[in-house]
Image: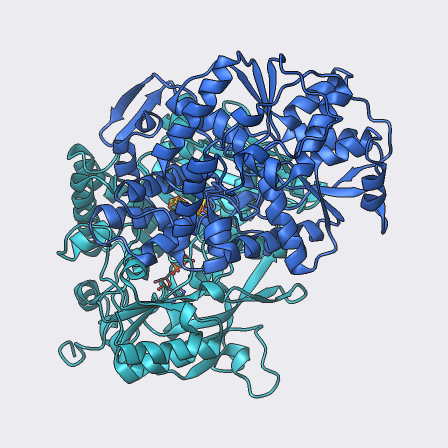
Chain colours: A cyan, B blue
Amino acid sequence: MLDKDILKEFQDVVGPEFIDDGDVMTNIYAYNWCTEFVNYMEGKEPIPFSSVPKAVILPSTTEEVQKIVQLCNKYKIKFKAQSTGLGPWNQPSTDNSIILDLRRMNKIVKIDEKNLYAVVESYVSGAQLQAEAMKYGLTVHMPGAGPMASPLASHTSMAGPGFTSPQTGHSARNVLGVEWVLPDGNILRLGSLGQKNNPDWFIGDGPGPSLRGIMRGWVGAKSGIGVFTKVGIKLFPYPTDTKFVMTGHAPLYNFEKPDYIRAYVFDCKSWKGLEKIMLRVEEEEVGFIVSHISGLAVMAIFSYSIEGLMDKMALGVLKNPLLVVMGARTKREFDYKQMVMEDILTEYDLENIVDTKYVPEKVFYAECLRANLGYHGFIATGGFQSAKGQADAAALCLRAEKTNIPLKQKYIKKEAIANDFGEGAWMTSYEGGHFFHMESPTMFNQSDLKSVKGMANYMDESNKQDLIKHLGAPFFIEGDKLHDEWGPHMMNYHNWLRKIKAAFDPNGVADSGFYITAKKEGENK
Amino acid sequence: MTTEHFPEEEYQRMIKMCLRCSVCKWIPQVQIKSQKYASCCPAMDIYDYHAYSGGGRIILALAYEMGRVKPSEDLLNIVYRCTECGNCAIACKYMNTLEPLEIIMRFREKLVKDGYGPMPQQKAYTEAMKKVNNPYNEPHEKRVDWLPSDIKVDPDAKLLYYVGCTSSYRRKEMAIAAARIMNAAGVPFNILKDDEFCCGSPVYRTGDVESFKVQLNKNLDVMESKGIETIIFSCAGCYDTFKVDYPLYREYNFEVLHTVEFFEQLIEEGKLKFTTEVPITVTYHDPCHLGRTAEQYEEWAGDELKLMPLVSINIPPKPKNIGARGVYDAPRNILNKIPGLKLVEMERIMEYSYCCGAGAGVKSAFPDMAIRASKNRIEEAEDSGANILVSACPFCSTNLQDGIKESGSKLKYYDISELILMALGLEPEKLKQATAGGS
Ligand SMILES: Cc1cc2nc3c(=O)[nH]c(=O)nc-3n(C[C@H](O)[C@H](O)[C@H](O)COP(=O)(O)OP(=O)(O)OC[C@H]3O[C@@H](n4cnc5c(N)ncnc54)[C@H](O)[C@@H]3O)c2cc1C
Ligand code: SF4
Ligand code: SF4
């Protein structure tokens, strides 16, 4: 709860109905997915509730956000911004924190179809933006989380690989102009938006201030460096024609498959083969989805319930599967891409199982086009989280994957995580194979204490393994403890990060539970 | 008995499983066609805080079980600002196995049992229902005042038209239309008159299961004593309650049909012949209780097979209600058969139709919320290009018409049975009004 006078000042900013410091509301906002094992990793009770925020506030404009941040500075209260609020990184790290739920900031400010970008606020969802972009034959990059997540959150603050990454890249690479309320309450406009004359959103780095690296780096500051209120993001050509006709009922909608879309799943049979073939497919730039997933994951992306997995057991035996989905706008383009794929299949003696051994439901193609494949990860146990999260060369990503198998098997034996033979992985390229992403989705049961604890220990060991075996930094190196562990091994980046934090957030009000605090500066010099 | 279709252990397990993914705030992701009509939850659209979503309500149920929150006005205001429309459940169950709507209903039941729910206005209508058999507190003896003298009722018929409180007292035009259509088709039917009592839906949806059971038994006793073979309903709420909820507490042996299902049959059998052009452009609002929530629970007597630690499957698969078996085709088939009528669809239809905003006690306890939700739907209907909004539920009718008035919309509203009468040539005056101002 907030002190009455302070509450009044916040109420004056947003109106009394848009701030709630009551027990009921603040407890609801203290809950999040995976919070139980994050708590356990931090030595706290493994319950799905974090520290309870002092209040939840729903601003509707940049000016309101600015005033809220100024009040936080005045009263030394921390703030945590959230868009759709999925995941533990939305949670306050202290009970001296308020949550800014940006739900009311939900405008698509513009779609510039000629210059291929859109400007959005925080609570525009990926599906909403895509639906509007599709009207111009365009699409947007979405993280693997899926179309319900916020493009603004993903682009400015949180990770960034997605199933369409071969075509649409990584969120960090798609950010253009940014409107940013800094932790000290000032507003900074990045890129071409920061120009004195004719400010516009079309580019993220100069003309105008170029601070993209500081703003989000690779995995994002997760609200630890202020609040992003509007962002310009790149749009891309939609892979096929945009006629999107669905009949029937959920979940197996009868989707009218566009003329020029085709999926391939084949077994590359060995790690070396997988690397070679994946690079080759990427080099040809034929697929808008090029994902290596495990045999079990192949079963899962084609299933709509756990029972649905059962008739797909034959797919589970694939050793090193690759999923390629290609789309085209014209018959000529489609024929060309198909011929390229035929060449690759012949050259490497591969067998496409799609439409031969297995015919996917029509809605599968709709999900490919609308970036809805990630959610299939929840089918088996209702809970999952990924270890790893490397961004590197294909070879290193595959090494990380291979190294993880025995570790995963250890926890499978302990019955802490579900049995995917240790092989559960997702690897995609970015931007036509220039670099790659690998993570290891792991299924656990969030309501089973043994599973929660096991998952926490597994994540911890996986992180440590990446460090010891030089496998690159995983996704979830966040918070002081992990940065302090990793920094000395990686050119002391943590000291620089702390300097940034100190410079941008002199009062330490941007909640940094999932970023870094400035407090240890000096100790690590 | 209630615990059979949704055992307490399931409730306790599921309230720990929400992913907080917000999928339940939107219609199924692959169905989203625009930013404007992407959302599915009237409560979220109006109150914005995550607490009001299906997922937020699950978290609240967990926080309550864990003793993190105590019953309070704040808590009740969240719990009861929900129409139990079930749209969140459709979105969640697209892939997930949670039951947001069941959890919402069970949580209310617990609050009532613990002595906290429902809201004062809902308690008042519960008392009215107990006293005069209808939640509107109207005299029981006036229940059949709607019945014009020229309508033929057959006291020996085994086909019963259960009129329901709203059509009896508030939307008499619907009761009259349904009865006239049956007369036109030459189908003998009976009504219960003094022996018809509220179906209990308004109290059931607020969590007062005990009062509901009294109502259910009263109704079933009468129907069984009369040897009824088929009951038809023009109210989607009564229909859903009889079809889906009654069998959870007491089995019965008669067939249950909504008027749209029954009238479609009569058209197919040639008993109803459309003779008159009705040159209008309409859009159809799927009532929640006729659509996604009108799926009967299917019995499941299989086994849970543990495939491996943490992963179990049901053999055979447990039937999952995901809205696919709602009544969607019958009303559309009828409309498409009316000569001259053009049906255009809104963006949110069938199992992901947007709620009118009135259900589960919202209209009485939170009239503001009901109107705001209704206005959202009216705007969507206007954007469809139709100038007439049609539906098949008296409760939707009232709230949507209130929404039309409040928003100053030019839309006209008719129940589907009124359009049938026009097409049968039995309502020339109404037809003139409907077509006035162009189609
Ligand atoms: C099934 C599943 C698969 C996933 N796969 C991927 C994946 O493939 N790739 C990937 O990148 N991620 C993945 N994620 C994580 C996902 O990217 C994020 O959860 C998502 O991008 C966040 O979008 P959101 O709308 O939920 O944002 P939120 O969850 O609201 O925010 C994400 C973070 O950004 C911060 N934030 C949000 N808005 C603002 C703002 N306006 N200003 C400052 N900070 C803000 C929040 O505090 C939080 O730390 C996955 C998650 C799930 C559940
Ligand atoms: S109820 Fe279902 S859809 Fe909603 S947040 Fe929870 S898991 Fe997601
Ligand atoms: S039942 Fe309807 S109103 Fe209630 S939370 Fe679900 S979608 Fe919202």
User: For this view, does B332 lie left or right of residue B286?
Assistant: right
| Image location (x, y in percent) of residue A153 | 43, 62
Q: Residue at x 56, y 51 (%)?
A: B38
Query: For the point 43% across and 29% down, which residue is it?
Result: B215
- Which of B353 and B271 lies nearest the eye of the viewer? B271
Most extreme residue toward the bottom, as rendered?
A196
Q: Tell me where residue A351 appears, x and y as whole percent.
A: 49, 27
Query: Is B390 drawn above or below residue A77 in the view shown?
Result: above
Task: Say which of A108 and B133 sits in front.
Answer: B133
Q: How many callouts does the rendering have?
A: 0
Q: Name the residue located 48 percent from the left edge and 80 percent from the top edge.
A: A189
Q: Residue B213's image quarter? A: top left
Of residues B70 and A358, the one drawn nearer to the viewer in this rendering: B70
Can I make out residue A297 in this image?
yes
Residue A441 in sight: no
Name the spot of residue A316 as percent of width and height, x first: 37, 27
- Pick the quarter of the image with the N terminus of chain B: top left
What is the x, y in percent for residue B151? 73, 25
Left or right: A207 in relation to B217: right
Q: Nearer the viewer, residue A369 or B289?
A: B289
Which image quadrant is residue A28 in?
bottom left
- Please indicate whether residue B439 sits to the left or right of residue B305 in the image: right
